[in-house]
Image: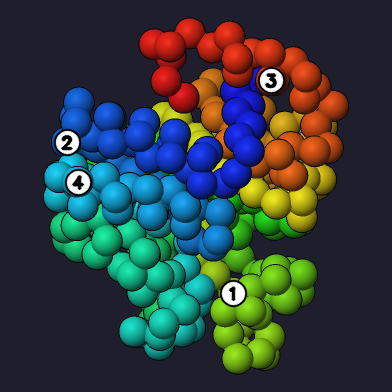
Amino acid sequence: MAEMLVFETAEAGAQVVADHIAQAVRASSAFTLGVATGSSPLPVYAALARHAAGGADFSRVSAFALDEYVGLPAGHPQSYAEVVAREVTEPLGLDPALVRVPDGGAEGIETAGDRYEEALIEHGGVDLQLLGIGATGHLGFNEPGSSFASPTRVKTLTERTRQDNARFFDSVDDVPMHCVTQGLGTILRARHLVLLAFGEGKADAVAAAAEGPVTASMPGSAIQLHPRVTVVLDEAAASRLAHRDYYAWAQRHKPAWQGI
């Protein structure tokens, strides 16, 4: 069972996650963080930036992004390479040479997944992978029907995901149709998964992922196959959990030395 941590606000939960990451980096500066885009991890990045402003050194931290759109021109403000640079690399003071994002350029796209898999394996994998979850239950851009053994590859986005992401573009017509995404099998190789979900709109997906059957129809349920998962929620995102009372009891009696 995943560890379920519920906080009054997204900011409170994000601070706990950021404190854990900062402590891990102090213990081993050659730490590898898996970074996600979207709104869910933003409070964590903001809290990590406060650590950096307070003197924490993230300059030796490596980062691997979950995914990238296919076909956006270099420098496009909504390409995930630019989003990661803007929201993670610069505020935390990461070395850009240690930050990797899948190659979404049209040239060589047929090998983009294989190249990213090779880079991850050669590096030695990810220590802590931050994840959000979509309304359809997708992790990264692994839409319903994705294999739990899938590697990094090119995927076609669902119309629901394109509609959800249209708020970042001028219109839904500008949202790319394809992406390069780490597969569920790739994500499950990370040593620690931290799933972040905030707001009532995520409540059904969270409940299905954490407590429902393990099925390709709910990609988020892949977290049940991992030995170390922490799910960080606000009260609204936790509102559909059947075992909410137990999670609250376990959280109150959590040994202080366990961390997240």
- Distance from Cα at disc 4 to Cα at disc 2: 16 Å
Numbered disc in front, either 1 or 3: 3
- Distance from Cα at disc 1 to Cα at disc 4: 39 Å
Pointer 4 local density, CA inside 10 Å: few below 14, some 14–19, many at least 20: few
Hey, which quadrant is residue 258 in on the image? top left
Q: Quadrant of the N terminus?
A: top right
Q: Which mark is residue 178?
A: 1
Numbered disc in front, either 4 or 2: 4
- Which amino acid lies under the numbered mark 2 shown in the image of this protein? Ser
Q: Which residue is mark 2?
A: 29
Q: Earlier in the sequence, mark 1 or mark 4?
A: 4
* Residue 42, above or below 167: above
51 left or right of 7 in image:
left
| Residue 135 seen by the camera | yes
Pointer 2 local density, CA inside 10 Å: few below 14, some 14–19, many at least 20: some
Numbered disc in front, either 3 or 2: 3
227 left or right of 77 in image:
right
- Distance from Cα at disc 4 to Cα at disc 3: 32 Å
Between 128 and 4, the residue placed more toward the observer is 4
Q: Earlier in the sequence, mark 4 or mark 2?
A: 2
